[in-house]
Image (cartoon, grey):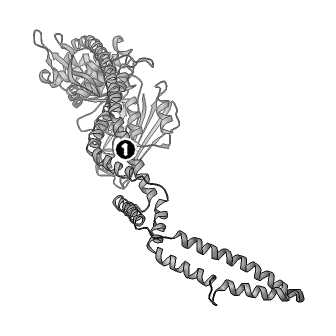
């Protein structure tokens, strides 16, 4: 519950400290005094965006601070997720600097606006006379009905449907994407197959390009190679005087004759003998190599054709090696295999989609049944309250109509049917209910949350604020409105901004908002203070008559408050 509220430099409020009790709190004051300004300030703490226009003094920052008692509300996980220390006594603070910078704190820890919004949804429910328009909003109707469906950890019907819908839509998207891929691949399959066949028929081998290029060079210069080898061999060993080997053999024989007589000659003979052996081997290799080299025009054509093929394929695919062509061939093979397997994958996914759709249908049927039950219980709880609010002939019911498709909220269209008069046809309340009737209907919905048939299924927020919901209500109806609010306040904190004395008289705490011109600041400033018992009588009497109140009004005020 809201324990206290501190406001500085917000709109007409210079500085104010307000304490709130746990029961029924009434806030009254003349029109324009600043009653709804309190809600604007509180809205900042609940995550609303800041606006520099709220700064009365443009040189000072605006500060709004509230103390909440949150014991037993189960909000610990929300704090843990936001990495904020939890305490049963929560202090929220919001600051707006003249520069426009806004800061928020929870228990002195900086927090972001989404955290404040999530927290505020569990702390305060603010209902204004304009909120009756939400009765015509389908999202509100779904939220209301679904909040009345009993939930446990083991059985959460709304969550089960949400999970089934998410699973079905996810699988359906996968199927659509796979089908689209399959259609696109089918268009490309012939081209991919042609490319693969071309590379596959080329019978590519790693490192073959280098070997072929070497062989091509050899074949192209075969004659020159043979001539060079022949000339080198002739110079090594023939019958001419220039031949190397015969001359060296003669030199060997000459050294052999003198070697016994000179040790250095013997060493030279040994070295010459080794050289002759090596040169003989070179000469043999020259001859063998010359015999192996021959020009073959057919082989030349084969090698050149093979290289031309390799070069063409490399240029076509934008690569510079046979190894890269092999990688492309293998990738094409994998893509073709994938295309071939798409049919089976699509078939398997279609079976999953069908299964998920069956589960979705089952979950939707369960959700529809639960909503029908919740709608019946809501109608049962609302009607007595509507009768108390001066509509004894009113009828209200919830109708669910099946939709042609399944959506995030289910397979239903929810209609709230209403008629305030006997014998009339139940019709959509947005078409038949007046503004006053909508206000009373919304109050009945809020009050119905305390009904034994509903409260077991619904965890209400600890603080409910009514902002002039009693607009258009008077007389005995206003007494009934006050009685209902008083009854609700037995289970939660109810704060009502009201202009009706019959409602203010039923409150356990009465706050008055008033404004006055301060000469020092030369501007109008709003103030709020708690009224004593005697001051309450006077205030209610003023609301009944005039200021100062008449003796009759004072007596009536005492009777109302008693």
In percent of width and height, residue 541 lies at 26, 24
Find residue 39 and report its horizontal and vertical position in percent: 32, 36
Q: Is residue 100 above or below residue 413?
A: below
The residue indicated by pointer 1 is 335
How many numbered marks, from 0 up?
1
Residue 147 shows in the view = yes
**Residue at image point 41% right, 26% down:** 21
Q: Using the image, determine if residue 488 lies above or below residue 268.
A: above
Please indicate whether residue 269 sits to the left or right of residue 426 in the image: right
Q: Nearer the viewer, residue 118 or 548?
A: 118
Residue 553 in view here? no
Residue furthest to the front: 239
Name the side, left or right, on which 85 lies relative to 489.
Answer: right
* Residue at figure coordinates x 80%, y 85% from the top left: 268
Q: Quadrant of the N terminus?
A: top left
Residue most toward the left? 424
Question: Could you say which quadrant of the image residue 114 lies in?
Answer: top left
Q: Pick whichever, 140 or 524, lies toward us.
A: 140
Where is residue 363? Give x, y as percent: 33, 19
Numbered disc 1: secondary structure: helix
Residue 400 is situated, as x and y percent measured from the top left of the image, at: 22, 17
Residue at 59%, 82% (x, y): give it: 234
How packed mark 1 is, by other alpha carbons closer than 10 Å (few <14, some 14-19, many 20 or more), is some
Viewer-proximal residue, 150 or 531?
A: 150
> Residue 59: which quarter of the image?
bottom left
Residue depicted at x 30% and y 31%:
172
Q: Quick one: quadrant of the C terminus?
A: top left
Question: Which residue occupies the foreground of this view, 444 or 416?
Answer: 416
Residue 296, above or below 547 = below
């Amino acid at each position: 519950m809201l324990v206290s509220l501190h406001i500085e430099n917000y709109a007409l409020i210079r500085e104010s400290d307000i304490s709130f009790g746990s029961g029924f709190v009434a806030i009254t004051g003349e029109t324009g005094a600043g009653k709804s300004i309190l809600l604007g300030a509180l809205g900042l703490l609940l995550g609303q965006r800041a606006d520099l226009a709220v700064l009365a003094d443009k040189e000072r920052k605006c500060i709004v601070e509230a103390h909440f008692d949150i014991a037993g509300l189960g909000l610990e996980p929300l704090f843990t997720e936001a990495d904020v220390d939890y305490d049963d006594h929560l202090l929220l603070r919001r600051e707006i600097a003249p520069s426009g910078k806004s800061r928020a704190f929870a228990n002195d820890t900086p927090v972001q606006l989404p955290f404040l919004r999530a927290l505020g949804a569990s702390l305060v429910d603010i209902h204004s006379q304009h909120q009756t328009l939400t009765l015509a909003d389908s999202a509100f109707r779904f939220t209301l009905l679904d909040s009345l469906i009993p939930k446990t950890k083991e059985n959460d019907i709304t969550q089960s449907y949400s999970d089934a819908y998410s699973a079905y839509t996810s699988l359906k998207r996968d199927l659509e994407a796979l089908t689209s891929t399959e259609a696109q691949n089918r268009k490309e399959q012939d081209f991919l197959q042609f490319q693969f066949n071309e590379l596959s028929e080329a019978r590519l081998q790693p490192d073959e390009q280098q070997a072929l290029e070497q062989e091509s060079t050899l074949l192209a210069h075969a004659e020159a190679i043979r001539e060079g080898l022949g000339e080198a061999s002739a110079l090594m060993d023939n019958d001419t005087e220039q031949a190397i080997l015969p001359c060296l053999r003669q030199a060997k024989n000459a050294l052999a004759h003198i070697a016994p007589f000179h040790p250095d000659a013997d060493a030279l003979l040994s070295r010459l003998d080794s050289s002759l052996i090596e040169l003989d081997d070179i000469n043999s290799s020259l001859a063998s190599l010359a015999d192996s080299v021959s020009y073959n025009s057919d082989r030349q054509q084969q090698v050149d054709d093979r290289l031309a093929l390799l070069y063409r394929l490399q240029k076509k695919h934008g690569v510079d090696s046979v190894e890269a062509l092999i990688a492309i061939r293998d990738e094409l093979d994998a893509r073709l295999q994938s295309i071939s397997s798409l049919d089976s994958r699509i078939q398997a996914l279609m079976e999953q989609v069908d299964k998920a759709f069956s589960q979705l249908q089952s979950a939707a049927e369960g959700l529809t049944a639960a909503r029908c039950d919740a709608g019946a219980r809501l109608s049962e709880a609302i009607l007595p309250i509507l009768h108390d609010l001066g509509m004894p002939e009113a009828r209200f019911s919830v109708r669910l109509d099946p939709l042609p498709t399944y959506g995030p909220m289910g397979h239903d269209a929810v209609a709230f049917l209403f008629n305030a008069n006997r014998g009339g046809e139940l019709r959509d309340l947005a078409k038949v209910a007046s503004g006053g009737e909508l206000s009373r209907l919304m109050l009945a919905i809020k009050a119905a949350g305390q009904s034994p048939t509903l409260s077991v299924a619904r965890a209400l927020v600890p603080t409910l604020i009514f902002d002039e919901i009693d607009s258009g209500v008077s007389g005995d109806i206003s007494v009934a409105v006050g009685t209902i609010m008083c009854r609700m306040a037995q289970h939660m904190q109810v704060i009502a901004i009201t202009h009706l004395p019959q409602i203010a008289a039923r409150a356990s705490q009465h706050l008055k908002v008033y404004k006055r011109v301060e000469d020092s600041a030369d501007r109008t400033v709003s103030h709020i203070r708690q009224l004593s018992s005697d001051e309450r009588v006077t205030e209610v009497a003023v609301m009944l008559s005039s200021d100062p109140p008449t003796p009759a009004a004072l007596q009536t005020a005492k009777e109302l408050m008693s």
